Amino acid sequence: MKNKPIYVEISIYSDMEKLWDATQKPDLHEQWDLRFSSITYLPKQENEPQHFLYKTNIGFGLNIAGFGKSVGSFHAEDGSRTSSLHFGTEQPISIIRSGKGYWKYKPEQNSIKFLTQYDYKTNFRALGKLFDFLLFRPLMGWATALSFDVLKRWLEKGESPSIQYRRFFSHWMITFLFAFIWIYQGLIPKLLMKHPEEISMTKSLLSVRLSQATTAVLWIGIVEIIFGFIWLFYENKKRLLGLQLILFPLLTLSAIIAVPASLSHPFNPLTFNLTLFVISMIGFFMNNDIPSAKSCKRKR
């Protein structure tokens, strides 16, 4: 099983020196690159490669520490630049054993084409290669592309990487929250459990027979599950959030009309839907200019 090298390319409207500093100075590089938590340059002798140490936090108090060296940089006559490096780690838990790659900076008419290609060898033999193929390499490519878009927005608009990442992860936490809520509410109480309170509330609200109310609850559950999956795959999340700003007040009003006594229950429709309404409003107003790996080319 031979994996293809990771390739990412993006055009950045910036001058060369500003881009070069942001990618070559460790205190700037570690701010925008999602793959590294810290980068430390070691003392350098003249005419020697630049050695460095890096660390990547992977959660639960664990981190991967590695080493690398810049094996050379080249400034061409056409103004383009290339920076090559080798990297690796001796930690046995790391999927990466060693690798190499390069960054290239190619001036265009009004921008700089910034691209990278890198590859690496894995630990854990066949199992490591399989894990790399199925999950780790796609994740590394995605993280590289997302980082490049964050770098682009930082240099072009002046918005710090930390603010961009805060908005990015908040956006996706809200997305997964609503996907889970809609799928859960449709699947568990309505389709699987056919909860009596769901049926009773629907019967009271629609003024229908018990059998009709049961069928209606099943269909409502299916619609909620579909809407939950739409949250995962539909790109215009702001449109979904705007729809929920209409839905949640209507659902709250319907529940209160159907069962007024529910207002005295713990976690009742008013408090539950009001919470979701406020989260939807927060998401709606912060859902602008979210960094995305899709802004980059991933193939030559």
Image: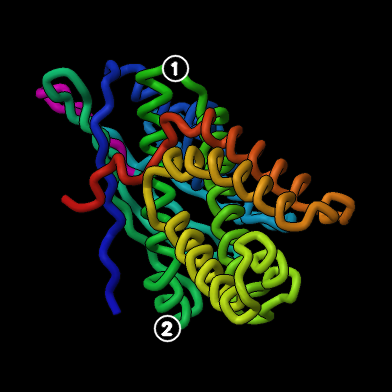
Tag on residue 158?
Answer: 1
Above or below, 193 relative to 26:
below
Q: Position of residue 211 (x, y in %)?
A: 60, 81
Residue found at x 41% / y 78%? 130
Residue found at x 48% / y 42%? 243
Considering the numbered disc 2 on the image, is that residue within a helix, a strand or a loop? helix
Tag on residue 68?
Answer: none
Magenta region includes residue 78 = yes
Q: Are marks 1 and 2 in contact (CB under 8 Å)?
A: no
Above or below, 158 relative to 165:
above
Q: Is residue 300 left or right of residue 95?
A: left
Magenta region includes residue 71 = no
What colour-coding does the image apply?
rainbow
**Three-letter code for the amino acid on which mark 2 is drawn:** Ala
Residue receiving disc 2: 126
1 or 2: tag closer to the N-terminus: 2
Considering the numbered disc 1 on the image, is that residue within a helix, a strand or a loop? loop
Residue found at x 48% / y 33%? 287
Q: Position of residue 234 (x, y in %)?
A: 38, 52
Q: Position of residue 244 (x, y in %)?
A: 54, 44
Above or below, 165 relative to 257:
above
**Three-letter code for the amino acid on which mark 1 is drawn:** Gly
Q: Position of residue 44 (x, y in %)?
A: 49, 31
Residue 267 versus residue 195: which sits nearer the camera?
195
Residue 265 versus residue 104: which sits nearer the camera?
265
- Magenta residues? 75-84
Q: Is residue 285 left or right of residue 204?
A: left
